[in-house]
Amino acid sequence: MDERMERIIRAADHLRSLTGTRKPRVGIVLGSGLGKLAEKIEEPLTVPYRDIPGFPVSTAIGHKGNFIFGRLGGKEVVAMQGRFHYYEGYSMDLVTLPIRVMKVLGIEWLFVSNAAGGVNFDFKVGDLMIIRDHINLLPNPLVGRNMDEFGPRFPDMTRPYDPKLIEKAETVASELGIPLKKGVYLAGTGPSYETPAEYRYFRMIGADAVGMSTIPEVIVARHCSVPVFGMSVITNEAHDDYAEDYENNGDDVVAAADAAADRMSMLFAGIISAL
């Protein structure tokens, strides 16, 4: 058996031994400062990543590093309270390992979130942006031997973010009175923040928001034929006309994400309940 598959099966078997008959239908990935949604999960069972065989440890600011099993919006879910990033030094196999483990555990949908810089001049700090498409500047996680157990060698990416889930999100947001943006998310390697010239370039090639994560997880989910809903919290204005003394600050990003987390939590719960 492929060593990658062995790692996935070993982790999934360990989690099943802890969760018993629970079978998550929805997987959720919570980005920087967005772990607050995990507090909304009912009947929670928390499993630290460090206790899962073969799992890396999350080292990023604002990422607690837990799987949380429970109920949200009336559905069984498993939430990642923090993710893994390429900039932490992990291979793409490890960055996306939890997505394949969640697929083996039985998820039918994946919800991903992140903190992002708004390169679109119309975006302000605290805005919620539905990700309608993406531009990937990270290594593709499907490079290497194809894992036929999950999907084809050349998976289609015409609709990486599910149109029906986007439609549900817009309906739920309207009912809750939560304003939404919609746009294209671009991911680079990090960990350094981008230069003003890079922000200008990203805007020119069609990006609305920029970050350092999410897309590898989405590619792997789509390889597995799992529908994806994605959302960015705009935590800083990634423009190229800064004041002389301006600088990007990781703590400020986490604080801005935390301030928007309640609205995102309400929205995710509403969409999940409508599935």
Image (cartoon, helix red, strand yellow):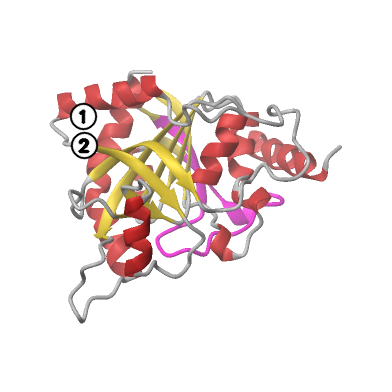
The location of residue 26, given as percent across then percent down, is 47, 28
- Horizontally, is 38 left or right of 180 in the view? right
The three-letter code of the residue at mark 1 reads: Ala
Circle 1 residues within 10 Å: few <14, some 14–19, many ≥20: many
4 and 243: which is toward the camera = 243
> Which label belongs to residue 122?
none
Q: Are marks 1 and 2 in contact (CB under 8 Å)?
A: yes
The answer to whether residue 58 is magenta is yes
Vertical relation: 123 (above or below) 158: below
The answer to whether residue 69 is magenta is yes
Query: Could you tell me which secondary element the residue under label 2 belongs to?
Result: loop
93 and 273: which is toward the camera = 93
Residue visible at 60% across and 43% down in the picture: 98
The location of residue 256, given as percent across then percent down, is 25, 58
239 and 191: which is toward the camera = 239
Residue visible at 70% across and 27% down in the picture: 152
The location of residue 230, given as percent across then percent down, is 39, 37
Judged by depth in the image, the label closer to the viewer, 1 or 2, is 2
> Which residue ends up furthest to the bottom in the rendered image?
245
- Horizontally, is 273 left or right of 262 in the view? right
The location of residue 55, given as percent across then percent down, is 66, 52
Residue visible at 27% across and 47% down in the picture: 261
The three-letter code of the residue at mark 2 reads: Leu
Residue under numbered circle 2? 180
For the record, the magenta segment spans: 45-71
Vertical relation: 159 (above or below) 244: above
Query: Could you tell me which secondary element the residue under label 1 belongs to?
Result: helix
Residue under numbered circle 1? 173
> Which residue ends up furthest to the right in the rendered image?
1
Q: CA distance from mark 1 to mark 2?
A: 7 Å
Callout count = 2
